[in-house]
Image (cartoon, helix red, strand yellow):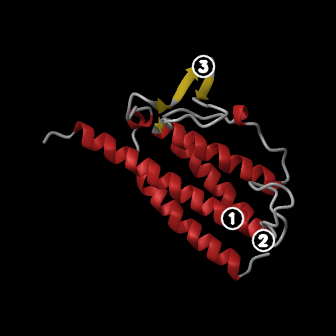
Amino acid sequence: MNDARTDLLQRQFDLTWGLLEYHLDRLVPEEVLWEPSPLCWTMHRSGDGWVPDWADSEPDPIPVPTIGWVTWHIGWWWGVTLDHLSGRVPRDREAVAWPGPDGVVEWLSALRGEWAAVLPTVSLDAPAPFPWPEGSGMTVADTAAWVNAELMKNAAELGQLRLLRAASSAKP
């Protein structure tokens, strides 16, 4: 099912992943739960796992996420996308198991590996099972392009949070 569009989407993904990987390679556990403002969304330890801050309707003002929350969010939307494209029952948001500050880089790298394995096997012209509603006319190619755009946005957020943390502790 590999064609020029798959190659283009893969090259675009590789570029996007490289931007994220730049920050993931430098990420230290202390940065992951750093709170950039008093109003923020983060991850909380609960029992044997971690739970994200969440609201079913977007609050106003929108809380600033921590790196931990951004990485959980990547794992959630990307994992559900992979579930849909792989024919698995999509997991609920509450079932996304964030590994914590020490395991987040490996977790996201595993999702990258799964995406690299799935993308060449799907029909880009098939109706998109996610993230658009059924009957939207969107295709799997649209989903793959959305993955690239969403990952680029999240890479920028993660990078900005790392820069803000470094700048906030720098001496003038």
Q: Is residue 96 left or right of residue 24?
A: right
The one nearer the camera, 146 or 45, is 146
Contact between marks 1 and 2 (CB within 8 A): the answer is yes
Amino acid residing under circle 3? Ser
Q: Quadrant of residue 145?
A: bottom right
Q: Residue at x 50, y 31 (%)?
A: 42
Secondary element at image label 1: helix
Q: Label 1: which residue?
A: 144
Disc 1 marks which amino acid?
Ala
Residue 94 sits in quarter: top right
Q: Residue drawn at (58%, 66%), measured in percent from left and top?
A: 13
Residue on which disc 3 sits: 46
Q: Quadrant of the C terminus?
A: top left
Q: Which mark is first along the chain, 3 or 1?
A: 3
Can residue 24 be seen here? The reply is no
- Could you say whether the residue bearing mark 3 is in a helix, strand or loop? strand
Mark found first going from the N terminus, 1 or 2:
2
In percent of the image, x 69 and y 47: which residue is there? 79
Q: Residue 26, how many percent across, how many down?
A: 38, 48
Q: Is residue 44 visible?
A: yes
Q: Amino acid at mark 2?
A: Leu
